[in-house]
Amino acid sequence: MAADVQASQVGAQPPNKVTRFIGFAVVGASGLVVNQMALWFLTSKVGIYYLLSAILATQLSTVWNFALVERFVFDGGHDGRWVRLGWFALMNNLWLLLRTPFLYALTDGAGLNYLISNALVLGAMTLVRFGIADNLIWADRSDLRGASAMRDGTRVWNYDIHGIVGITSESRLPELVRFQVPALLGPADIEVVVSNEGFGGLRRTIDVVEQDATISYVEHLGRHGFAAKIDVDTLARIQVSKMLRRSPHVAYTNVVEPVVRWVMVRKGYILAHAACLQIDGHGVLITARTDTGKTTTCLKSIKEQGSGFVSDDMVIIDQQGNALSYPKPLTISSHTLNAVKGAPMPMRTRAWLQVQGRLHSKFGRSVGMAFGNINLPVASMSAIVQMIIPPPKFQVDRLIPEVDMVSSLTLDRLVVIERGDATLRELDTDEAFEILSENTEDAYGFPPYPRIGHALSNGEMVREQEIRRTLVSGLEAVLLRTPDRAWFTMLPRLAAGIDTPGGAMLDVTNEQDAILDLTGANVLQMESPESVASRFEKLSPTEAEEVEKALSGALALLQKVSDILDGQNENDEPAVSGLVASVRSLRDARMPQGKR
C-alpha cells in the first residue's frame, strides 16, 4: 500500500518502550537509594517507628523519582505536570498500602533487616509501576510522538483508507497504522475529537441519549471513564473521553470501527468480518464466528502454502466482488501461539505473549460481556485493563517477514469455517448471506455497539444487505467443518473450485457422517446410522442399554480429553476429535430405539 512506508516512518515513537523502561528502572534505583537513606535516618537517628518512617520516606522518594522521570524518561511538558505528580504520588502510596504488610512479614515474620525487606519489596514491583506510568500517567506525552500533524494547536493522526475514507484523529488508532499519512488530500470523512466536555460525572447506570442528531453513550464513571458521542446524521464527528486516548485499541474497536463500517456502506462498500487470502491466484474469503481460528488459519496458510495476505479480521468489499485489504494488526490469542512459533521475536516478547494471549482471549471477552449484562461499566473496565496490559497485536509481516502483502483482488470463493463433526458442503446464496451477516454482527457484540448500532446504521441496513447479497450471489460458497483447526490444509483445493475435475474438490455433501483425513485429503466414510441402528435392533433391551451406556461414557471421556488438548497440542487433537465424532455417531445410531 502506498501509505505503508509513510506509516512506518511517521508512526515511529522513539524512544521505544524498552528504552523508557531502562530509564525508569535507573531512576527507580536512584529513588531506592533516596528511600533507603530517608528510612535509615528517620528510623535510626530520629527514632520513628520503621513503618511510619517507610511512609514518610515514600513521599520523599516519590518527589525525587517524579522529577527525574518527568525530565529524562517521558519528556513531560509544563502542561498537566501537577496532575501527573498527583497520579504518580497516588500510585506510589497505593503501592505503599500493598507493600506495608509484605514489609512487616519480611521484617518481623522472616527476621530480615528492615532495609533489606524494603529493598526487596520496592524492587519487586518496578515492572508493574512502569506499566502504569507508561500507559496511564504519561500516556498522552508518549503517544504524541507518533502524531503526524497539528490542527488548531493539537497534534493529530491522519489515516487514508484506500482513498475511500479519510480520518483525522486526536487519538492514535494503532489498528489503522498501515493507512497513516502525513496529511489528507481532502476533507476528513471522520474527525475524532478527544474531550470530556458534556459527559458529566458519576452515575448509577449507563446513559444512552439520542438528541439533536447525535447519540451519546456514557458509562458509570462519566467523563472519567468510557464515554463517546457521535453525529449520527453525517457520521463525520466522534467525540471520545480522555480515557480512550490512553486506551487506543478500545477507542478504535469499540467506537471508531463501527462508524467506519457505516461510512463504508454510504460509499458503496461493506466491511465484512472475514479473513481474505490469495491462494494460487484465487481470492478466498474466510468467515467465522469471533475466536474460531481465522488468524491461525491465515498464518498457517501463509507459512506452509505461500498464500498472499489481504486481511485477517475485516475486509472492504464492493458488490462486484472486489476486495481491498484492511490489514489491522493480528491479535495473537492463546490458541494462536502455536502458529507463530517460528516468528522472529525476542524471548521476553514470547513470554509476555503467554500473559496477554490468555487475558485477551475468548474467555476474557466472555467474562467482559457477562459483566456488561449486570449493569457494570464493562467498556471502562476493558479500557483500564488494556492500558495496563495491551492486547497482543502484531503486523503480519513481523510474524512472517516473507509474506506477500496483497492490496486488492477479485473474490472467487467464500469458505465458512466451523468446529464440529467433519462436514464439507456447498452453500446456496441465502445460506451464505445469512452466515456472513451473522458473523459480521458477531464482531460488534461488545458495548457500546448493541445499544447504539441502530442509530449508526441510520437507515443504511438495507443497503448493506443488498451489497452483501449481490456479493455472495457471485461467489462459490462452502461450509467447512472439522473437529480441529486444520482448515488451512483444505484451502488450496477449495480455492481451485467446486466443479474442478480431477478430484480437486471433495464431495462429502451426503448425509452420512464423514471424517476428513486432512493430511491426505481423503474422506473416510463410516457406515450410515441406519445400518448401525439395524444392528442395535437385534440386541436385547438389556444388551442395548449396556452398549449405550458404554458409548456415552466413552464419548464423555473422549470429549474431556479433546477439551484438554484444545489449543495446547494441535498435533494430537485431530485424532482424538475424530474418535469423538465416531463415538458420537455410534451413540446417535440408537435413535430408532428412542435413546440418545
Image (tube, helix red, strand yellow):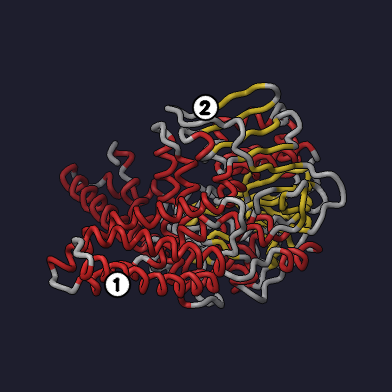
Q: Nearer the viewer, residue 138 or 308?
A: 138
Q: Nearer the viewer, mark 2 or mark 1?
A: 1
Q: Provide residue 148's location: percent of width, then percent of height.
A: 75, 58
Q: Tell whether 589 sits left or right of 143.
A: left
Q: Is residue 286 visible?
A: no
Q: Residue at x 56, y 57 (%)?
A: 294
Q: Is residue 254 visible?
A: yes
- The three-letter code of the residue at mark 1 reads Ala
Task: Tell me the element at label 2.
Answer: strand
Position of residue 416 relative to residue 541, above or below, is below
Q: Provide residue 74's location: percent of width, then percent of height.
A: 57, 64
Residue beneath label 2, please?
207
Position of residue 277 relative to residue 268, above or below, is below
Q: Residue at x 38, y 55 (%)?
A: 581
Pick out the residue farthest to the top: 211
Pick out the residue farthest to the right: 185
Q: Provide residue 379's location: percent of width, then percent of height.
A: 49, 41
Q: Earlier in the sequence, mark 2 or mark 1?
A: 1
Q: Quadrant of the N terminus?
A: bottom right
Per the rendering, the mark at residue 119 is: 1
Q: Tell whether 154 sits left or right of 383.
A: right
Q: Residues within 10 Å of mark 2 (few under 14, many from 20)?
A: some
Task: Tell me the element at label 1.
Answer: helix
Q: Within the image, what quadrant is residue 542 found in?
A: top left
Q: Tell whether 549 sits left or right of 201.
A: left
